[in-house]
Amino acid sequence: MGQTILVTGGAGFIGSNLVRFILENRPDDRVINLDALTYAGNLESLADLMDDPRHEFVHADIADVEKLEGVMPRVDSVLHLAAESHVDRSIHDPSLFLKTNIIGTQVLLDAAKRHGVGRFVYVSTDEVYGELPLDDKSQLFTEETPLKPNSPYAVSKTGGDMLARAYWHTYGMNVSITRCSNNFGAYQFPEKVIPLFVNKLIEGEQVPLYGDGSNVRDWLHVLDHCEAICRVLDDGKPGEAYNIGGNNERSNLELTRMLIDLCGRDESAIKHVEDRLGHDKRYAIDASKIRRELGWEPTRSAWPGALEETVQWYKDNRVWCDHVRSGEYKRFYAQNYSGS
Ligand SMILES: NC(=O)c1ccc[n+]([C@@H]2O[C@H](COP(=O)([O-])OP(=O)(O)OC[C@H]3O[C@@H](n4cnc5c(N)ncnc54)[C@H](O)[C@@H]3O)[C@@H](O)[C@H]2O)c1
Protein backbone atom coordinates (compact mmCIF):
# COMPACT_ATOMS: atom_id res chain seq x y z
CA MET A 1 0.00 0.00 0.00
CA GLY A 2 1.23 3.48 -0.79
CA GLN A 3 2.34 5.93 1.85
CA THR A 4 2.83 9.66 2.27
CA ILE A 5 6.49 10.46 2.73
CA LEU A 6 7.61 13.79 4.16
CA VAL A 7 10.95 14.71 2.57
CA THR A 8 12.61 17.64 4.33
CA GLY A 9 15.12 19.62 2.29
CA GLY A 10 13.52 18.35 -0.90
CA ALA A 11 14.53 21.46 -2.85
CA GLY A 12 18.25 20.86 -2.22
CA PHE A 13 20.72 18.74 -4.13
CA ILE A 14 20.06 15.27 -2.70
CA GLY A 15 16.48 16.10 -1.68
CA SER A 16 15.39 17.11 -5.19
CA ASN A 17 16.97 13.96 -6.62
CA LEU A 18 15.22 11.95 -3.91
CA VAL A 19 11.80 13.49 -4.60
CA ARG A 20 12.27 12.68 -8.30
CA PHE A 21 13.50 9.16 -7.46
CA ILE A 22 10.46 8.43 -5.28
CA LEU A 23 7.95 9.78 -7.80
CA GLU A 24 9.56 7.76 -10.59
CA ASN A 25 10.18 4.50 -8.72
CA ARG A 26 7.46 4.26 -6.09
CA PRO A 27 4.20 4.87 -7.98
CA ASP A 28 1.97 4.28 -4.96
CA ASP A 29 3.72 6.83 -2.71
CA ARG A 30 3.05 10.55 -2.33
CA VAL A 31 5.67 13.14 -1.34
CA ILE A 32 5.23 16.16 0.87
CA ASN A 33 8.35 18.23 0.25
CA LEU A 34 9.05 20.63 3.11
CA ASP A 35 11.83 23.13 2.54
CA ALA A 36 12.71 26.61 3.81
CA LEU A 37 14.26 27.55 0.45
CA THR A 38 17.51 28.85 1.86
CA TYR A 39 20.18 29.92 -0.65
CA ALA A 40 20.73 26.16 -1.28
CA GLY A 41 17.10 25.25 -1.97
CA ASN A 42 15.90 25.72 -5.51
CA LEU A 43 12.50 24.70 -6.77
CA GLU A 44 13.72 25.10 -10.31
CA SER A 45 15.37 21.71 -9.74
CA LEU A 46 11.83 20.30 -9.56
CA ALA A 47 10.17 22.59 -12.11
CA ASP A 48 8.72 19.66 -14.08
CA LEU A 49 7.28 18.08 -10.92
CA MET A 50 5.64 21.10 -9.31
CA ASP A 51 2.21 20.23 -10.72
CA ASP A 52 2.47 16.48 -10.12
CA PRO A 53 -0.53 15.53 -7.96
CA ARG A 54 1.70 13.16 -5.94
CA HIS A 55 4.08 16.01 -5.03
CA GLU A 56 3.09 18.73 -2.59
CA PHE A 57 5.49 21.53 -1.73
CA VAL A 58 5.36 23.19 1.67
CA HIS A 59 7.50 26.29 2.17
CA ALA A 60 8.51 26.00 5.81
CA ASP A 61 11.37 25.81 8.24
CA ILE A 62 11.77 22.43 9.99
CA ALA A 63 11.67 24.35 13.28
CA ASP A 64 8.26 25.91 12.51
CA VAL A 65 5.98 23.97 14.86
CA GLU A 66 2.77 25.48 13.47
CA LYS A 67 3.58 24.51 9.89
CA LEU A 68 4.61 21.02 11.04
CA GLU A 69 1.26 20.65 12.81
CA GLY A 70 -0.46 21.25 9.48
CA VAL A 71 1.58 18.53 7.78
CA MET A 72 2.35 15.71 10.22
CA PRO A 73 -1.19 14.31 10.58
CA ARG A 74 -0.96 13.24 6.91
CA VAL A 75 2.55 11.77 7.09
CA ASP A 76 3.40 8.06 7.30
CA SER A 77 7.22 8.38 7.08
CA VAL A 78 9.83 11.11 7.30
CA LEU A 79 13.07 11.27 5.30
CA HIS A 80 14.96 14.09 7.01
CA LEU A 81 17.54 15.77 4.79
CA ALA A 82 17.04 19.50 5.47
CA ALA A 83 20.29 20.92 6.77
CA GLU A 84 22.92 23.57 6.42
CA SER A 85 25.38 21.47 4.43
CA HIS A 86 28.50 23.41 3.44
CA VAL A 87 31.57 22.83 5.63
CA ASP A 88 33.21 26.12 4.61
CA ARG A 89 30.17 28.12 5.69
CA SER A 90 30.13 26.28 9.02
CA ILE A 91 33.74 27.32 9.62
CA HIS A 92 32.84 30.99 9.08
CA ASP A 93 29.62 30.89 11.12
CA PRO A 94 28.66 27.75 13.07
CA SER A 95 25.53 29.17 14.73
CA LEU A 96 23.02 28.54 11.93
CA PHE A 97 24.37 24.99 11.59
CA LEU A 98 23.63 24.21 15.23
CA LYS A 99 20.20 25.86 14.98
CA THR A 100 19.04 24.01 11.87
CA ASN A 101 20.88 20.71 12.13
CA ILE A 102 20.41 20.09 15.85
CA ILE A 103 17.49 22.21 17.15
CA GLY A 104 15.58 21.90 13.87
CA THR A 105 16.01 18.13 13.96
CA GLN A 106 14.72 18.02 17.55
CA VAL A 107 11.63 20.07 16.64
CA LEU A 108 10.95 17.78 13.67
CA LEU A 109 11.46 14.62 15.74
CA ASP A 110 9.07 15.97 18.39
CA ALA A 111 6.40 16.71 15.78
CA ALA A 112 6.79 13.21 14.30
CA LYS A 113 6.57 11.70 17.79
CA ARG A 114 3.45 13.71 18.70
CA HIS A 115 1.67 12.46 15.63
CA GLY A 116 2.81 8.84 15.88
CA VAL A 117 4.64 8.91 12.53
CA GLY A 118 5.51 5.28 11.76
CA ARG A 119 9.02 5.67 10.35
CA PHE A 120 11.78 8.29 10.51
CA VAL A 121 15.07 8.19 8.58
CA TYR A 122 17.75 10.71 9.50
CA VAL A 123 20.13 11.36 6.61
CA SER A 124 23.48 11.82 8.31
CA THR A 125 26.98 11.85 6.84
CA ASP A 126 30.28 9.97 7.02
CA GLU A 127 31.80 13.18 8.39
CA VAL A 128 30.47 12.22 11.84
CA TYR A 129 33.37 9.74 12.06
CA GLY A 130 36.06 12.39 11.64
CA GLU A 131 38.95 11.53 9.36
CA LEU A 132 41.14 8.60 8.33
CA PRO A 133 44.89 8.68 7.71
CA LEU A 134 46.17 9.05 4.16
CA ASP A 135 48.92 6.47 4.57
CA ASP A 136 46.84 3.43 5.54
CA LYS A 137 44.26 2.62 2.89
CA SER A 138 43.13 -0.49 4.80
CA GLN A 139 41.26 1.70 7.29
CA LEU A 140 37.60 2.39 6.50
CA PHE A 141 34.71 3.86 8.49
CA THR A 142 32.35 1.17 9.76
CA GLU A 143 29.16 1.76 11.75
CA GLU A 144 31.20 0.85 14.85
CA THR A 145 33.83 3.56 14.28
CA PRO A 146 33.64 6.07 17.16
CA LEU A 147 32.06 9.39 16.22
CA LYS A 148 34.74 12.10 16.23
CA PRO A 149 33.45 14.96 14.09
CA ASN A 150 35.97 17.68 13.28
CA SER A 151 34.20 20.61 11.60
CA PRO A 152 31.29 22.62 13.04
CA TYR A 153 29.18 21.14 10.20
CA ALA A 154 30.14 17.59 11.17
CA VAL A 155 29.46 18.31 14.84
CA SER A 156 26.01 19.66 14.03
CA LYS A 157 25.22 16.57 11.92
CA THR A 158 26.48 14.35 14.73
CA GLY A 159 24.11 16.15 17.12
CA GLY A 160 21.17 15.40 14.81
CA ASP A 161 22.37 11.82 14.27
CA MET A 162 22.64 11.15 18.02
CA LEU A 163 19.32 12.87 18.74
CA ALA A 164 17.59 10.68 16.17
CA ARG A 165 19.06 7.60 17.86
CA ALA A 166 18.01 8.94 21.27
CA TYR A 167 14.38 9.26 20.10
CA TRP A 168 14.51 5.54 19.24
CA HIS A 169 16.21 4.59 22.50
CA THR A 170 14.16 6.86 24.77
CA TYR A 171 10.73 7.01 23.16
CA GLY A 172 10.76 3.85 21.06
CA MET A 173 10.37 5.78 17.80
CA ASN A 174 11.03 3.80 14.63
CA VAL A 175 14.19 5.69 13.61
CA SER A 176 17.09 4.64 11.36
CA ILE A 177 20.15 6.64 10.32
CA THR A 178 22.14 6.74 7.07
CA ARG A 179 25.77 7.89 6.86
CA CYS A 180 26.82 8.51 3.27
CA SER A 181 30.05 9.65 1.67
CA ASN A 182 30.35 12.59 -0.78
CA ASN A 183 27.65 12.71 -3.44
CA PHE A 184 27.97 13.85 -7.04
CA GLY A 185 25.33 14.30 -9.73
CA ALA A 186 22.85 16.81 -11.15
CA TYR A 187 21.30 19.77 -9.30
CA GLN A 188 24.11 20.40 -6.80
CA PHE A 189 24.44 24.02 -5.73
CA PRO A 190 27.52 25.45 -7.47
CA GLU A 191 29.43 26.19 -4.25
CA LYS A 192 30.37 22.50 -3.86
CA VAL A 193 33.56 21.33 -5.52
CA ILE A 194 32.34 19.55 -8.67
CA PRO A 195 29.79 22.11 -9.94
CA LEU A 196 31.96 25.00 -8.67
CA PHE A 197 35.02 23.77 -10.58
CA VAL A 198 33.08 22.85 -13.74
CA ASN A 199 31.52 26.31 -13.82
CA LYS A 200 34.87 28.02 -13.35
CA LEU A 201 36.58 25.83 -15.93
CA ILE A 202 33.86 26.52 -18.49
CA GLU A 203 34.05 30.24 -17.74
CA GLY A 204 37.84 30.27 -18.29
CA GLU A 205 38.67 30.90 -14.63
CA GLN A 206 41.11 29.15 -12.32
CA VAL A 207 39.88 26.61 -9.75
CA PRO A 208 40.86 27.08 -6.08
CA LEU A 209 42.40 23.80 -4.87
CA TYR A 210 42.85 23.51 -1.11
CA GLY A 211 46.45 22.86 0.03
CA ASP A 212 48.31 20.27 -2.00
CA GLY A 213 45.07 18.54 -3.07
CA SER A 214 45.97 15.29 -1.31
CA ASN A 215 42.73 15.09 0.75
CA VAL A 216 40.70 12.05 -0.25
CA ARG A 217 36.92 11.76 -0.66
CA ASP A 218 34.84 8.65 -1.45
CA TRP A 219 32.42 9.67 -4.26
CA LEU A 220 28.95 8.18 -4.75
CA HIS A 221 26.32 9.05 -7.36
CA VAL A 222 23.39 10.87 -5.77
CA LEU A 223 20.85 8.42 -7.23
CA ASP A 224 22.70 5.47 -5.66
CA HIS A 225 22.37 7.38 -2.39
CA CYS A 226 18.63 7.93 -3.01
CA GLU A 227 18.13 4.23 -3.65
CA ALA A 228 19.97 3.40 -0.42
CA ILE A 229 17.81 5.84 1.57
CA CYS A 230 14.69 4.11 0.21
CA ARG A 231 16.09 0.68 1.15
CA VAL A 232 16.67 1.92 4.69
CA LEU A 233 13.17 3.44 4.77
CA ASP A 234 11.65 0.09 3.79
CA ASP A 235 13.83 -2.45 5.59
CA GLY A 236 16.28 -0.66 7.90
CA LYS A 237 16.20 -1.80 11.51
CA PRO A 238 15.03 0.66 14.18
CA GLY A 239 17.89 2.26 16.09
CA GLU A 240 20.49 1.22 13.50
CA ALA A 241 22.86 3.27 11.35
CA TYR A 242 23.83 2.29 7.79
CA ASN A 243 26.99 3.44 6.01
CA ILE A 244 26.58 4.20 2.31
CA GLY A 245 29.52 4.50 -0.08
CA GLY A 246 30.84 3.24 -3.39
CA ASN A 247 34.56 2.43 -2.81
CA ASN A 248 35.45 5.29 -5.10
CA GLU A 249 38.26 7.11 -3.30
CA ARG A 250 39.87 10.03 -5.14
CA SER A 251 42.21 12.76 -4.00
CA ASN A 252 41.02 16.29 -4.66
CA LEU A 253 43.96 16.71 -7.04
CA GLU A 254 42.95 13.61 -9.02
CA LEU A 255 39.35 14.88 -9.18
CA THR A 256 40.52 18.31 -10.30
CA ARG A 257 42.70 16.83 -13.06
CA MET A 258 39.76 14.77 -14.32
CA LEU A 259 37.51 17.84 -14.38
CA ILE A 260 40.18 19.87 -16.16
CA ASP A 261 40.45 17.14 -18.77
CA LEU A 262 36.67 16.89 -19.24
CA CYS A 263 36.44 20.68 -19.68
CA GLY A 264 39.30 20.90 -22.15
CA ARG A 265 41.60 22.98 -19.94
CA ASP A 266 45.16 22.36 -18.69
CA GLU A 267 46.97 22.36 -15.34
CA SER A 268 47.46 26.12 -15.44
CA ALA A 269 43.78 26.27 -14.42
CA ILE A 270 44.74 25.11 -10.91
CA LYS A 271 45.22 27.80 -8.29
CA HIS A 272 46.57 26.33 -5.04
CA VAL A 273 44.97 28.18 -2.13
CA GLU A 274 45.51 28.01 1.62
CA ASP A 275 44.08 24.79 3.04
CA ARG A 276 40.64 24.70 4.68
CA LEU A 277 40.95 25.03 8.47
CA GLY A 278 40.97 21.61 10.10
CA HIS A 279 40.58 19.95 6.69
CA ASP A 280 39.78 16.23 7.13
CA LYS A 281 42.40 14.15 5.33
CA ARG A 282 40.47 11.15 4.13
CA TYR A 283 36.96 9.69 4.17
CA ALA A 284 36.35 6.11 3.10
CA ILE A 285 33.30 4.00 3.74
CA ASP A 286 32.80 0.34 4.50
CA ALA A 287 29.24 -0.18 3.18
CA SER A 288 29.17 -3.93 3.68
CA LYS A 289 26.32 -3.75 6.22
CA ILE A 290 23.77 -2.17 3.87
CA ARG A 291 24.94 -4.44 1.02
CA ARG A 292 24.60 -7.55 3.17
CA GLU A 293 21.45 -6.72 5.14
CA LEU A 294 19.43 -4.65 2.67
CA GLY A 295 20.77 -5.92 -0.67
CA TRP A 296 21.82 -2.44 -1.83
CA GLU A 297 24.50 -2.08 -4.53
CA PRO A 298 25.68 1.12 -6.22
CA THR A 299 24.99 0.87 -9.96
CA ARG A 300 25.46 4.45 -11.20
CA SER A 301 28.69 5.57 -9.55
CA ALA A 302 31.53 4.13 -11.68
CA TRP A 303 34.10 6.67 -12.84
CA PRO A 304 35.08 8.00 -15.30
CA GLY A 305 31.69 7.45 -17.02
CA ALA A 306 29.47 8.73 -14.19
CA LEU A 307 31.67 11.79 -13.61
CA GLU A 308 31.68 12.55 -17.32
CA GLU A 309 27.84 12.45 -17.40
CA THR A 310 27.68 14.78 -14.40
CA VAL A 311 30.07 17.27 -15.99
CA GLN A 312 28.01 17.13 -19.18
CA TRP A 313 24.87 17.87 -17.14
CA TYR A 314 26.43 21.08 -15.80
CA LYS A 315 27.59 22.04 -19.28
CA ASP A 316 24.06 21.47 -20.63
CA ASN A 317 22.33 23.28 -17.77
CA ARG A 318 24.04 26.67 -17.73
CA VAL A 319 20.69 28.41 -17.28
CA TRP A 320 19.92 26.37 -14.15
CA CYS A 321 23.35 27.26 -12.74
CA ASP A 322 22.90 30.97 -13.46
CA HIS A 323 19.43 31.01 -11.95
CA VAL A 324 20.28 29.20 -8.73
CA ARG A 325 23.35 31.34 -8.26
CA SER A 326 21.27 34.48 -8.64
CA GLY A 327 18.38 33.17 -6.54
CA GLU A 328 15.97 34.64 -9.08
CA TYR A 329 13.89 31.51 -9.67
CA LYS A 330 13.87 30.61 -6.01
CA ARG A 331 12.07 33.84 -5.27
CA PHE A 332 9.63 33.24 -8.13
CA TYR A 333 8.72 29.75 -7.00
CA ALA A 334 8.55 30.73 -3.34
CA GLN A 335 5.87 33.27 -4.25
CA ASN A 336 3.93 30.92 -6.49
CA TYR A 337 4.14 27.70 -4.53
CA SER A 338 3.91 28.81 -0.94
CA GLY A 339 2.18 25.52 -0.14
CA SER A 340 -0.19 24.67 2.66
N1 LIG B 1 26.00 16.41 -0.37
C1 LIG B 1 26.63 15.37 0.15
O1 LIG B 1 27.62 14.90 -0.40
C2 LIG B 1 26.10 14.70 1.41
C3 LIG B 1 26.68 13.51 1.84
C4 LIG B 1 26.15 12.86 2.98
C5 LIG B 1 25.08 13.42 3.65
N2 LIG B 1 24.56 14.61 3.23
C6 LIG B 1 23.39 15.14 3.96
O2 LIG B 1 22.28 15.09 3.08
C7 LIG B 1 21.39 16.17 3.33
C8 LIG B 1 21.16 16.96 2.05
O3 LIG B 1 22.42 17.45 1.58
P1 LIG B 1 22.50 18.34 0.26
O4 LIG B 1 23.87 18.24 -0.25
O5 LIG B 1 21.35 18.04 -0.61
O6 LIG B 1 22.29 19.79 0.89
P2 LIG B 1 21.78 21.13 0.19
O7 LIG B 1 22.45 22.23 0.92
O8 LIG B 1 21.91 21.05 -1.28
O9 LIG B 1 20.22 21.16 0.52
C9 LIG B 1 19.73 21.41 1.81
C10 LIG B 1 18.25 21.76 1.69
O10 LIG B 1 17.73 21.95 3.01
C11 LIG B 1 16.95 23.13 3.01
N3 LIG B 1 16.99 23.71 4.36
C12 LIG B 1 18.05 24.25 5.00
N4 LIG B 1 17.69 24.68 6.22
C13 LIG B 1 16.37 24.39 6.37
C14 LIG B 1 15.42 24.56 7.40
N5 LIG B 1 15.77 25.17 8.56
N6 LIG B 1 14.15 24.14 7.21
C15 LIG B 1 13.78 23.55 6.05
N7 LIG B 1 14.64 23.38 5.02
C16 LIG B 1 15.91 23.78 5.18
C17 LIG B 1 17.58 24.04 1.98
O11 LIG B 1 16.68 25.03 1.50
C18 LIG B 1 17.98 23.04 0.91
O12 LIG B 1 16.94 22.84 -0.01
C19 LIG B 1 22.02 17.00 4.44
O13 LIG B 1 21.42 16.61 5.65
C20 LIG B 1 23.49 16.59 4.40
O14 LIG B 1 24.08 16.70 5.66
C21 LIG B 1 25.04 15.25 2.12
Image (cartoon, rainbow, N blue to C red):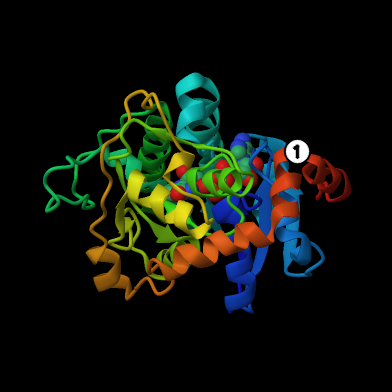
Figure check: 9 above or below 243:
above
What residue sits 54% from the left and 55% below the top?
14
On the question of residue 305 being in view, the answer is yes
What residue sits 32% from the left and 72% below the top?
294
The kind of residue tagged 1 is Ser
Q: Left or right: 78 with respect to 239?
A: right
Q: Left or right: 336 with respect to 205?
A: right
Quick one: SS at disc 1? helix
Figure check: 183 above or below 96:
below
Q: Nearer the viewer, residue 133 or 81?
A: 133
Figure check: 197 above or below 220:
above
Q: Is mark 1 within 8 Å of ligand 1?
A: no
Residue 262 location (% of width, % of height) = 49, 59
Q: Left or right: 283 with respect to 305?
A: left
Q: Nearer the viewer, residue 33 or 307?
A: 307
What is the quadrant of residue 298 in the picture? bottom left
Q: Nearer the viewer, residue 198 or 226?
A: 198
Residue 26 location (% of width, % of height) = 58, 76
What residue sits 52% from the left and 56% below the top?
264
Q: Nearer the viewer, residue 327 or 22?
A: 327
On the question of residue 70 being in view, the answer is no
Q: Left or right: 181 with respect to 63?
A: left
Residue 253 location (% of width, % of height) = 34, 45
Crowdedness of circle 1 by 10 Å Cα count: few (<14), some, many (20+)?
Answer: few
What residue sits 28% from the left and 70% below the top?
291
Residue 111 location (% of width, % of height) = 58, 43
Residue indicated by mark 1: 326
